[in-house]
């Protein structure tokens, strides 16, 4: 189920990041929609949120117990992946950091690092947060791990990072049930919440 859903999202992101078809019937830009909470239909396992959201918009996913959890992308930033070490064996020139919040009335757990739930995609290219261990701020942002348990009614601030070859693309976050939230990423720094990582781009923590 998860592989099928991820493949569907990858196909969708190729359309989002590529050339869009002008004048598509009924098509609306995200900015034309009200900034209300958006998300998957509860119980619709394997569903893909077909509309790529913008920074600041919220998507409802489900925790490991099937309860709703609101996830909001708050900011992104691009930095030189080789800022501290020019000899790293990396394939991408950028260290992309994404900041997001999680909140749930019941508290809960969205997923572990081994669930491989947080990804970046641009056309046919994909990077996974779990595979990147050489960010300039590695070891400095443990308090913002995206894999911690959320307490009831408390906003949890999380940070994930990727080694990417280009700016832009989409952020994908998948829950235990195969539902995938998608955000379109700008090609420049935007939003808030990335500073705990970016301040250590060239200095040690």
Image (spheres, helix red, strand yellow):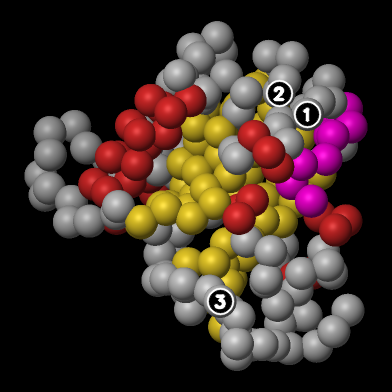
The residue identified by callout 3 is 89
Q: Is residue 103 visible?
A: yes
> In the rendered image of this protein, does residue 36 appear above or below residue 19?
above
Task: Check whether the beta carbons of the residues at disc 3 and disc 2 lie within 8 A of each other.
Answer: no
Q: How many residues crowd around disc 1 within 10 Å: few (fewer than 14), some, or many (20 or more)?
A: many
> Considering the numbered disc 2 on the image, is that residue within a helix, a strand or a loop?
loop
Of the numbered discs 2 and 1, the one sitting upstream in the chain is: 2
Please name which of the two marks, 3 or 2, marks the residue nearer to the observer.
3
Depth order, front residue of 32/114: 114
Which residue occupies 48% across, 55% down?
Answer: 127
Which residue occupies 72% across, 20% down?
Answer: 64
Q: How many residues crowd around disc 2 within 10 Å: few (fewer than 14), some, or many (20 or more)?
A: many
Depth order, front residue of 83/43: 83
Q: Quadrant of residue 88?
A: bottom right
* Distance CA(mark 3)–CA(mark 2): 35 Å
Please name which of the two marks, 3 or 1, marks the residue nearer to the observer.
3
| Figure quadrant of the N terminus | top left
Q: Is residue 102 visible?
A: no
The residue identified by callout 1 is 109
| Figure quadrant of the C terminus | bottom right
State the image coordinates of residue 89 (x, y, percent, origin top left). Answer: 56, 76
Asked whether 151 falls inside the magenta stretch, the response is yes
User: Disc number at residue 43?
Assistant: none
* Distance CA(mark 2)–CA(mark 1): 5 Å
Q: Which residues are magenta?
A: 145-153
The residue identified by callout 2 is 63
Q: Is residue 119 left or right of residue 142?
A: left
> Considering the numbered disc 3 on the image, is that residue within a helix, a strand or a loop?
loop
Depth order, front residue of 127/87: 87
């Amino acid at each position: 189920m998860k592989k099928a859903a991820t493949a569907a999202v990858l196909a969708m992101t190729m359309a989002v990041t590529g050339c869009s078809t002008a004048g598509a019937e009924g098509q609306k830009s995200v900015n034309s929609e009200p900034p209300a909470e958006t998300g998957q239909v509860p119980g619709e396992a394997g569903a893909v949120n077909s509309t790529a959201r913008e920074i600041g918009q919220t998507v409802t996913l489900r925790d490991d117990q099937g309860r709703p959890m609101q996830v909001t992308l708050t900011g992104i930033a691009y930095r030189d992946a080789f800022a501290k070490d020019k000899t790293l064996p990396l394939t991408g020139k950028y260290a992309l950091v994404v900041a997001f919040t999680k909140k749930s009335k019941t508290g809960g757990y969205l997923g572990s690092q081994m669930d491989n739930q947080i990804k970046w995609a641009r056309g046919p290219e994909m990077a996974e947060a779990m595979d990147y261990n050489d960010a300039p701020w590695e070891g400095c942002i443990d308090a913002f791990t995206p894999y911690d348990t959320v307490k009831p009614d408390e906003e949890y601030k999380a940070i994930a990072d990727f080694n990417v070859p280009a700016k832009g693309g989409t952020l994908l976050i998948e829950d235990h049930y195969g539902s995938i939230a998608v955000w379109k990423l700008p090609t420049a720094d935007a939003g808030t919440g990335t500073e705990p990582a970016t301040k250590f781009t060239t200095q040690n923590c």
